[in-house]
Image (spheres, coloured by chain):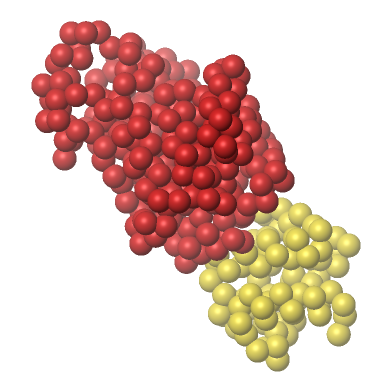
Amino acid sequence: MSEVLERVTKIIVDRLGVDESKVTLEATFKDDLGADSLDVVELVMELEDEFGLQFSDEDSEKILTVGNAVDYINSKL
Amino acid sequence: MNLQGKTALVTGASRGIGREIALELARLGANVVVNYAGNESMAAAVAEEIKALGGECFIHRANVADSEQVQQMVKETIDRFGQLHILVNNAGITRDNLLMRMKDSEWDDVMNTNLKGVFLTTKAVTRQMMKQRDGRIINISSIVGFSGNAGQVNYSATKAGIIGLTKSTAKELASRNITVNAVAPGFITTDMTDQLSEEVKQELYKQIPLGRLGEPKDIAKTVAFLASDNSSYITGQTIHVNGGMYM
């Protein structure tokens, strides 16, 4: 597992209280991981802090799956 | 009531109701950021009074209608105090005129400061309050947002708008333990109401069951209640503080 995915997974598990096995690249935050829209905003905030990045509002809206988040972070690092 | 260890940001705190709110929160032990738009010497005087009470305080000039200035102010608050628990959106202006005579600029200025300012400041503090799972946002509306007032289509529209903003924000943030409430003052003795003629004031008294104008401290004490733990189950509400003038 890539280091980015590992760190992203840890944040998702902590924040959403889901089992780590559910956090796959294909998993959607809302349907598969049970996040509501405010949860997603909070997750993005935590990812910003974790990776020292700033996600634009436009980009944030496109992050629907764990894979989207990992790809986005990788593209910015 | 005790606000020891809490940090409060009060907009428009150099005079009038905002000044009294800043002082009251400081008396209860909160660290206070005194925001002002232009009058530095009056803001500094408020800060001096707070320091004399033994409180931590700094003044910060920012136009609440300017997104960047607001974000900078919130950042400085968090850099300085580490946290931000209480936001009081008090900054407001009037540009009174009859509807038929009102200029676009009079409408826009009041909208920008009174309503957009609340949106921008609330948005800027939300990240910190969500992280803390602790926040109190108190918006200063007005009786005229409910009753209307000839000569104030702009001002009354912003004060009614604040109520919708308050309720929607309350619903969005409740799950994060952030409460959002409004206080709607009636006629309070401030520079804003000092401009009224004695004749107008005499007429006003007749419409106020308690028979007097309110004092800034009447508002400040209500705000302090909404900022405290005593109000933790109250959100999305408006408390009218008007001597019974509007019920």
- Which color was chain A given? yellow
| Residue at screen point 72% across, 46% down | B79
Residue B232 seen in this snapshot: yes
Image quarter where the N terminus of chain A lies is: bottom right
Q: Nearer the viewer, residue B94 or B85?
A: B85
B195, above or below A51, in the image: above
Residue A34 picture location, percent across and down = 56, 80
Residue B205 picture location, percent across and down = 15, 21
| Residue at screen point 56% across, 21% down | B45
Q: Is residue A53 left or right of residue B48?
A: right
Q: Nearer the viewer, residue B119 or B37?
A: B37
Residue B189 picture location, percent across and down = 31, 21
| Residue at screen point 63% across, 52% down | B83
Residue B70 seen in this snapshot: no
- Which color was chain B given? red
Q: Nearer the viewer, residue B121 or A23?
A: B121
| Residue at screen point 50% across, 29% down | B13
